[in-house]
Image (cartoon, rainbow, N blue to C red):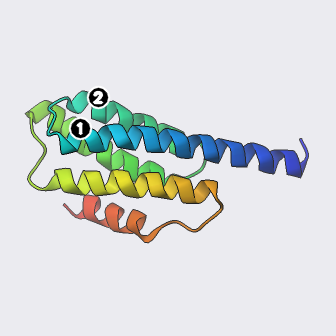
Amino acid sequence: MSDKAADETSTELLESFAEEARRRCDVISAGLATATTDFETMRAEAHALRGTAGVVGLRRLAELAGLMESDLAEAKKTGTIRGGRDHQIADAAKALAEGAAAAAKGEEEPPDVGRSLAQLFSA
């Protein structure tokens, strides 16, 4: 495969991931906004995001999705999201979608990705 073809394939993968991230993050955000207790659906969305982000080489986004997945897996077990974490997870979903969109455009990672990583790590 030529370098140009590889670049085009990489760009297509990142664009496809950006679309997937937007859809999946919308599901997570909507679930949090409506205070759903279907934590498994949101956890599964975060899990899929983690895997796909890792495959396309966006390690920090994969890490962010993994932190979201952990919180949602805990919520599935306990029946509730730990105090205040729902807003942090919603912010992380938004940051992840924006990070995927930026990667697809060849832009730098938005600062919200780092902020969300720090928030979810610290709590």
Q: Residue at x 17, y 53 (%)?
A: 85
Label 2 sits on residue? 41
Left or right relative to 53: residue 92 = left
Q: Which residue is painted at 44% across and 34% down in the image?
A: 48
Q: Residue at x 27, y 58 (%)?
A: 120
User: Disc 1 or 2, which lies upstream in sequence?
Assistant: 1
What's the distance in space between the residues labelled 1 and 2, CA to CA? 9 Å
Disc 1 element: helix
**Is 69 placed left or right of 60 in the picture?**
left
Please rate how many residues cluster around mark 2, counting C-alpha atoms within 10 Å: few if below 14, some from 14 to 19, many from 20. Answer: some
Query: According to the image, label 1 marks what residue?
Result: 31
Q: Is residue 50 visible?
A: no
Locate residue 5, reporting x and y percent.
Answer: 85, 45
Q: Which quarter of the figure is the N terminus placed in?
A: top right
Of residues 6 and 123, the one nearer the viewer is: 6
Residue ID at (45%, 44%): 22
* Residue 3 position within the rendered picture, expressed as x and y whole percent measured from the top left: 87, 51
Quadrant for the C terminus, please: bottom left
Q: Is residue 85 above or below residue 38?
A: below
Q: Position of residue 87 (x, y in %)?
A: 20, 55
Q: Residue furthest bottom?
A: 111
Front residue of 44/34: it is 34
